[in-house]
Amino acid sequence: MGSVCFIIDAMVTGAMLPRHLRSIRASGVADHLLPILVTSNCAHARLPSIEQRYHTRSLITPTLGLGARVNQAAFTSQAEWLIVALQKQPVPASLWGSLYSQLNTYALDALLVSLTQPTLPERFLRRLLASAPLLPPYIAIKRAWFERLGGFDPELDEERAVADFVQRLHACPIRLKTYSGQLIRQLSEPSTVSPSKLSAAYTPRL
């Protein structure tokens, strides 16, 4: 696995920020090892305690919008893989342990970590109607491709910046896969997941 850095924006996750951090650190693999950058446009009173408890680093930039904040964090980290939170909803801690091993630089360039997988007709319909893509809770992307795409658009507001980035991601010739909701549900159960199920849980984009 290449070097990994999580980027969690406090304005995107809101009150769910601690749950995101707890999920990442509870994976075991990320316990005090993988860096987590928390971005925000204001210094929340609880950020210092969050930094200490979850071993994070806060980047406070009052004048920057979401796109610019994430871009700055990506530049600051210099990790090979960036895992960026795109929604308020966190994912189960059991997901991360199995995800890290999939970040093989020779197999894919980006991974959408999704709680729900739209059906094939739904995906075709969204493309036909040119709808904004469904936003997953997280995206893992190689730094090289993040930079090639130009990062997030700093001129757009929070919601449009995320949707625009995901839309550009789908439009470029990138090796992109989705970590399906089915696997996440299996990982949330007491039973273990076999390697065959793990491989089957990957769904390539259309």
Image (tube, rainbow, N blue to C red):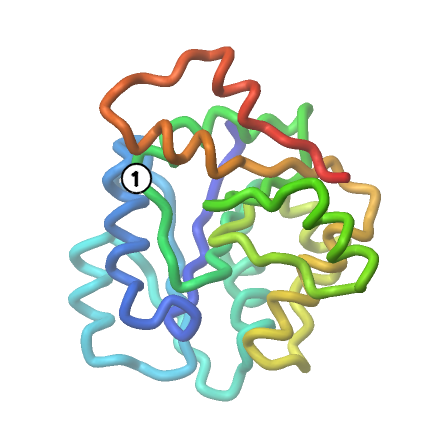
Query: What quarter of the picture does the C terminus occupy?
Result: top right
Q: Residue at x 56, y 20 (%)?
A: 200
In-image side of 164 versus 48 (left or right): right
Residue 191 placement: quadrant = top left
Q: Residue at x 55, y 30 (%)?
A: 103
Q: Can residue 68 be seen at all in this image of the molecule?
A: no
In-image side of 161 versus 7 (left or right): right
Label 1, on which residue?
A: 93
Whole-percent x, y for residue 61 in the image: 45, 80
Q: Nearer the viewer, residue 81 or 90?
A: 90
Residue 147 placement: quadrant = bottom right
Q: Residue at x 27, y 70 (%)?
A: 15
Mark 1 Cα shell of 10 Å, populated few (<14), some (14-19), many (≥20):
many
Q: Nearer the viewer, residue 89 or 145?
A: 89
Whole-percent x, y for residue 199 in the image: 55, 19
Please, what secondary structure does the residue beneath circle 1 have?
helix
In-image side of 53 versus 13 (left or right): left
Q: Can residue 5 be seen at all in this image of the molecule?
A: yes
Residue type of the residue flagged with mark 1: Ala
Whole-percent x, y for residue 175 in the image: 74, 35
Whole-percent x, y for residue 14 in the image: 34, 72
Q: Residue at x 55, y 67 (%)?
A: 72
Residue furthest to the front in view is 121
Q: Is residue 145 above or below residue 175?
A: below
Residue 183 placement: quadrant = top left
All told, the count of numbered labels is 1
